[in-house]
Image (cartoon, rainbow, N blue to C red):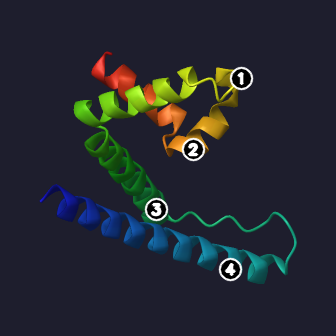
Amino acid sequence: MRKERKMETATTLNAMKAEIDEMLAADARMNDLQNEGEDGGYMHENPRLAALQHEYYVALQAAKIAEWDLETTNARRATWNAAVRSGKYKSVREYRKIEADTGICMSDLQEAIKRHGL
């Protein structure tokens, strides 16, 4: 059930992102047409684009909160701490390497730890 909901959310997010990209591309084409490729001049206010971008951001945050429940946060925190303590990395400043090796984003982990009060 949880996996199905996650896939459904991902599909919705992908559709929203595609629509946003389409609107931005249309605005860029209109800008090129109005300004003949020059900078400045054309400023199109698209309330639907702004609303969709906000809706996308809110949905993305909700998906992240749903993914990072307490159990997942604790497991990923333990994985992160084990990687740091392994001696493979010289300092925590090399967190980009740790992120690549563990697949855990440090900023997402910090956000989840703060949200759960750990």
Tell which circle, 4 or 1, labels the residue nearer the N-terminal end: 4
Of mark 4 and mark 2, the one earlier in the sequence is 4
The residue furthest right is 38
Q: Quadrant of residue 27?
A: bottom right
Question: Residue 90: which disc?
Answer: 1
Q: Position of residue 6 (x, y in %)?
A: 26, 59
Q: Earlier in the sequence, mark 1 or mark 3?
A: 3
Residue 47: mark in rendering: 3
Where the C terminus falls, by quadrant? top left
Q: Which residue is mark 2?
A: 101
Q: Is residue 20 left or right of residue 31?
A: left
Q: Earlier in the sequence, mark 2 or mark 1?
A: 1
Comparing 44 with 106, the one in front is: 106
Determine which quarter of the picture holds residue 16.
bottom left
Are there few (<14), some (14-19), or many (20+) residues within 10 Å of tag 4? some
User: How crowded is the residue under tag 2: few (<14 C-alpha within 10 Å), some, or many (20+)?
Assistant: few
- Badge 3 marks a residue whose secondary structure is helix
**Does dot 2 land on a helix, a strand or a loop?**
helix
Disc 3 crowd, CA 10 A, few/some/many (<14, 14-19, 20+):
few
Q: What residue is disc 4 on?
A: 30
Please tell me which residue lies in front, 39 or 21. 21
Of 96 and 12, nearer the camera is 96
Q: N-terminal of the two: label 2 or label 3? A: 3
Q: Is residue 7 left or right of residue 77?
A: left
